Amino acid sequence: MATATLSATQLLPLSLPKPSQKPRHAHFPFQSLNHSPRLFSSNGFVSNCSPIQALLNSTPITTEAGSEPEPFTLRQICQSHVPDHVLCKMEELGFVVPTPVQRQALPTLFSGRDCILHAQTGSGKTLTYLLLVFSIVNARRSAVQALIVVPTRELGMQVTKVARMLATKPKEGELEQKSCTVMALLDGGMLMRHKSWLKAEPPTIVVATIGSLCQMLEKHMIKLEAMRVLVIDEVDFMFSSKQVSSLRKLLTSYSSINTRQTVFASASIPQHKIFLDKCIQQKWTKNDTIHVHVNPVEPMPSCLHHRFVICLKNRRHETLLSLLQSDAPQSAIVFVGEQSEKSKKAGNASSATLLINFLKASYEGYSDILLLEEDMNFNSRAASLSEVRQAGSYLLVSTDIAARGLDLPETTHIYNYDLPRTAIDYLHRAGRTGRKPFSDKKCSVTSIIISKERFVLEKYENELMFNCEELIV
Ligand SMILES: Nc1ncnc2c1ncn2[C@@H]1O[C@H](COP(=O)(O)OP(=O)(O)OP(=O)(O)O)[C@@H](O)[C@H]1O
């Protein structure tokens, strides 16, 4: 059985095309680049790209004599694999310089091998697997060729949005490629509409939650015979969820490892060596699956400042209030534990609701404080998230539903109003901050605990290799 784990150093140097007599380039701005129509691409041909490419071609880099060349651009890594219009769109969106996971994983992914993509929260795994998807699918073929499975509707909407932006058809006359269609087949969606769509013309890429997907598979509404790439995002969460049997069925009965490339992604893959062996044994992935583990010694972004406050159990509201008053964060998420079934049955308000009511009455830092929890209906959940995304400044009170995969990159402060249940939950909550392209900002994660919870937090510190500073409020 050939298993492999690649760390950053093992994967380098990359066998990529040389930047052929071009000047090497310095640091590039990610955002606010206006678009101009025709510029020289890195292969020397005229292409319809954003000015980022011009910047790449014109800005000489200043490196110390004898030092290693600067990293390749995403375009250089993807050039012979991903269609040019997708690359142009990618650059227009500000994705020019690869993140470490993109630099390390893309060549492996383009080689066709199955892969376990294991890298920090907010490190750009979504774009990594989407670029693979676009390198494989053929927009002219009317069949589902790529399937991306995600744990929540919210994450599904986010991934769909990025995939649709990358797939956007170039303006009439510029290029003739037919663009890929992306269907979001997510819990809470309108399956009737999807049925008509699937009958009329199957989409190229489907982003699905496992529940909705299996409904469609069981009714033979969706066919996976032409599927060439399968991505399972937040894979550790998916395998520990109630829907694990559907997931196993998808991996082994509804499709076969021989006809697809399989990618499992997450920031946390506990016991990853055992997991890799199991993937191969169970035929979820092929024998030569690669584990791309980026920065294993630093499972969380290094810019995070971890703090804790000890308070009495009945003083949590007031403690959070004084933290908010002293931090005055522009954008923050407060994580609360889920309401127990017993408390729900007794008709009690959830602790998230009680907390929001308290903050609304006593804190004037935000015009609106938003709520996101599992028990809200899908429309209210979507409304909360869209308000958060549109607001320049927000305070979101949420259960762990917002902890997995959600990209709200402006978030600078995380508050654990309730301590997460596991170190992995801590990692994912903390990972809602310190995300690219805002990862240079000073971001903090503050846990409000009672004194007997200190040892639990210490356990998380050891497991995740971070230090927590005590704050006296
Ligand atoms: N090459 C890049 N340059 C600049 N920004 C990037 C690049 N790649 C991704 N990003 C941005 O980084 C942020 C995080 O990316 P993404 O959501 O894919 O993280 P992730 O690794 O999936 O995190 P998580 O494990 O929390 O789901 C997004 O806002 C994305 O737009």
Image: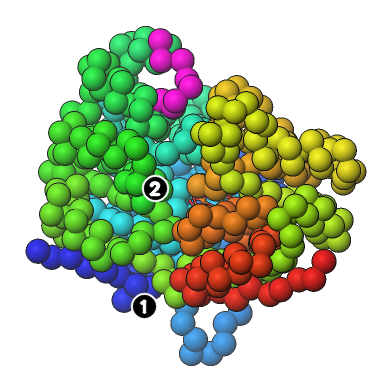
Of helix, strand and loop, which one carries label 1?
Answer: helix
Q: Which mark is residue 9?
A: 1
Residue at horizontal 54 percent and vertical 59 percent from the top = 426
Q: Give the magenta part as a residue range.
A: 185-192
368 vs 186, nearest the viewer: 368
Q: Amino acid at mark 2?
A: Phe
Q: Magenta span has 339? A: no
Residue at horizontal 41 percent and vertical 71 percent from the top = 296
Q: Position of residue 341 (x, y in %)?
A: 51, 34
Using residue 76 as the reference point, say whether residue 262 is left or right of it: left
Q: Position of residue 79 (x, y in %)?
A: 39, 53
Using residue 43 as the reference point, say whether residue 226 is left or right of it: left
Q: Is residue 364 visible?
A: yes
Above or below for 366 versus 443: above
Q: Amino acid at mark 1?
A: Thr
Residue at horizontal 35 percent and vertical 32 percent from the top = 210
Q: Which residue is mark 2?
A: 237
163 vs 96, nearest the viewer: 163
Quadrant where the image shows the N terminus: bottom left
Label 1 beta carbon within 8 A of ligand 1? no
Q: Residues within 10 Å of mark 1 (few under 14, many from 20)?
A: few
Q: Main secondary structure of the magenta part?
A: loop
Above or below for 111 versus 215: below
Q: Which mark is residue 289?
A: none
Answer with the quarter of the image where residue 458 lies: bottom right
Outermost left residue: 1
